[in-house]
Image (tube, coloured by chain):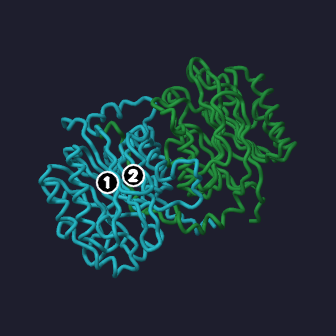
Chain colours: A cyan, B green
Amino acid sequence: MTGAGPYTVACLQTHPCFGDVAGNLARQRELLETAVGAGARLLVLPECCSTGYCFEDEREALSFSEELGRGPASELWLELAARHDVHIVAGVVERAGGAVYNSAALVGPDGVVGAYRKAHLWNREKEIFAAGDLGFPVYDTPLGRIGMHICYDAWFPEAFRLPALAGADIVCAPCNWVPVPGQPADQAVMASMLCMTGAHSNLLYVAAADRVGEERGQRFLGRSIVVDYGGWPLAGPAGADGEAIVYADIDPIGSRELRASNPFNQPLGDRRTDLYADLLGSTTKEQLA
Amino acid sequence: MTGAGPYTVACLQTHPCFGDVAGNLARQRELLETAVGAGARLLVLPECCSTGYCFEDEREALSFSEELGRGPASELWLELAARHDVHIVAGVVERAGGAVYNSAALVGPDGVVGAYRKAHLWNREKEIFAAGDLGFPVYDTPLGRIGMHICYDAWFPEAFRLPALAGADIVCAPCNWVPVPGQPADQAVMASMLCMTGAHSNLLYVAAADRVGEERGQRFLGRSIVVDYGGWPLAGPAGADGEAIVYADIDPIGSRELRASNPFNQPLGDRRTDLYADLLGSTTKEQLA
């Protein structure tokens, strides 16, 4: 496979208004057009970016859901991806088979490329969304092999490791990060560090788009970030307040040989799968208490 | 089990001289006595702390090896642990069954509690040491359930996850960290961040003792650190140069209930083991190139 060469990824840090799908999509269109105009070829939007996130219950989430490729958000992403020959990763409340998932859509110029459904549901999300049932798929695109995960997934190293093992060059992460209790003021936010160590321990890029603002009493964290495969920020973290577009030039395909030949860090090749059987165990904290 | 209550852990950042076992142990004795005098009940020493680390080959490593509990380093640790009623975790070049391992010994007042053998061998270590064959054992002590890993292991999230799944309250990590190429001056060192995200993503304490100095052209990183179960430094990182003792008060047993009831972060209970089968795959980077 020949490389696409370096290109620009953009993480769009948005401020959606709960339930105002038309207004949110209008603002998204402006920000997407701005990023495309600045040369971005891969654009990442936050979790549940067209609807808002703090649903009361499953029924309310269902009322804002759309089938992948067939609702108002999908239509915007499909239109812009086709017109501008770009790829878009965006969080969407997905309806499928009667269930509602907290999903990420990957849309390209030729249509929907694929989806990811959030595997690790956070806190009350378990009462609202069905648990993701797609695993951690990786989609081979002209921009590299793209894996996805969503927000709290990053708290699980498995959500970086599994895309890496499936060959991902980059993990695109729609997020609605919330402040972590106990965060010291003099330290990087834990979300940033999880992106950085996740990238470093898997030698892949991470592009995380987070939202800002407050919704039904829940504040969000901002701090959208693009991390290189060494684990260091290429751009961001953005601020905690206000919309932002975080741009970085990355080379997911062109860097493959360099990543594979790194003598200091072989995080996939040096794994000890012969010792890892317990990773599949069903041990839970309750059993350990 | 009743809790031991809070106690002091000490990470001893030493500057061993290659091959000078007697001198290194004499200095270790002084530092261990100092830490014990300051109230430490759990003491962590660096990787290969009595011998040095940059062996030419397996034969040289073997010439400095000792059987667990029966060599000059073990004798010092056993003596001090018994006299002062403390536990010591220390890196040792272990000889067993004709092989030489890069190991960590856990020694208590009643003798050797257990060992860990480095699972993920870094770079040239593969030519020198046999690969660890004990998995990631966790030892139940009066100071809590102690897991161990060594240096480069921290680059593998599995080396935090497996002790956590086995019930560890704390991971003690003897290290010989080396500078990571590309480390930006304005960021925390990657080793610190790996300890912090490893602790946070597994809700356990991490106590990492690293060495300083230079040996056969290889510099070491210092920056010994104790991290709380939320992922934040309790003490350290120490400096990059010079010996240091990093003290922190921790409560591994008393915090179990608090950790188990954290509504924001259930890194073990929220795992999706049904999706993790690929973590046991033998996929390597070479296959992905």
Along the horizontal axis of the image, is B211 left or right of A229?
right
Q: Which chain is mark 2 on?
A: A
Image quadrant occupied by the N terminus of chain A: top left
Disc 1 or 2, which lies upstream in sequence?
A: 1
Horizontal and vertical percent for residue B133? 56, 42
Under mark 2, the amino acid is Ser
Q: Quadrant of residue A148?
A: bottom left
- Give the residue at mark 2: A224
Extreme residue in the right direction: B83
- Give the residue at mark 1: A12
Disc 1 and disc 2 in contact, CB within 8 angstroms:
yes
Along the horizontal axis of the image, is B79 left or right of A55?
right
Q: Quadrant of residue A39?
A: top left
Nearest to the observer: residue A102 or residue A16:
A16
Q: Residue at position x 36%, y 64% from top? A: A118
Nearest to the observer: residue A248 or residue B170:
A248
